Image (tube, helix red, strand yellow):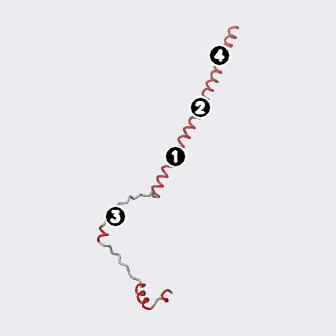
Amino acid sequence: MASRFLLPAVRRTVQPSLTRQTRSFQTSGILRDAAAAPVAVKKPVGAFRGGIFGFLLGSVASGAGMYYYVLDEYKVSNELLTTDIYALQAAVQRIENYVRTLEEKFDASSKKK
């Protein structure tokens, strides 16, 4: 549309520049030989490394949690076992005292006869 309003002389000079030109992908020797400044490349954490890191972190965390859970259960069961042992020891002492008194009564009754 804009070309309608241009003068015929200008239109002739504008038309050749509107045609499509092919680009050449050549580089000059100076640009090819120029060394680029080294840029610190930050290596991103990939999915594989992140997955392994997450797996190991989760395994260590669950292992530590399980260790403390088992340790707590061991302490509780150990306390219950020692309580039962003390109760059994007290029951054995009561039975021993009862048998002793029965033996003494039996000996006393057998001496009277």
Q: Of label 2 and label 4, which has the lower sequence position?
A: 2
Judge by depth and name the residue closer to the eye, 104 or 55: 55
Q: Which residue is mark 4?
A: 100
Q: Which residue is mark 1?
A: 61
Task: Tell me the residue at 49%/89% (across/down).
Answer: 5
Is the C-beta separation of discs 2 and 4 under 8 Å?
no
Q: From the viewer's perspective, is the residue at label 2 or at label 1 nearer? A: 1
Q: Of label 1 and label 3, which has the lower sequence position?
A: 3
Q: Of label 4 and label 1, which has the lower sequence position?
A: 1
Q: Of label 2 and label 1, which has the lower sequence position?
A: 1
Q: From the viewer's perspective, is the residue at label 2 or at label 4 nearer? A: 2
Q: From the viewer's perspective, is the residue at label 2 or at label 3 nearer? A: 3
Q: Position of residue 84 (x, y in %)?
A: 62, 29
Q: Which residue is mark 3?
A: 36
What crowding class fits label 4: few (fewer than 14 Cα within 10 Å), some (14-19), or many (20 or more)?
Answer: few
Seen in the image, is 112 located left or right of residue 22? right
Q: From the viewer's perspective, is the residue at label 1 or at label 3 nearer? A: 3
Q: From the viewer's perspective, is the residue at label 4 or at label 1 nearer? A: 1
Q: Residue furthest top?
A: 112
Q: Of label 2 and label 3, which has the lower sequence position?
A: 3
Placement of 75 over or under 112, stated as above or below: below
Judge by depth and name the residue closer to the eye, 106 or 14: 14
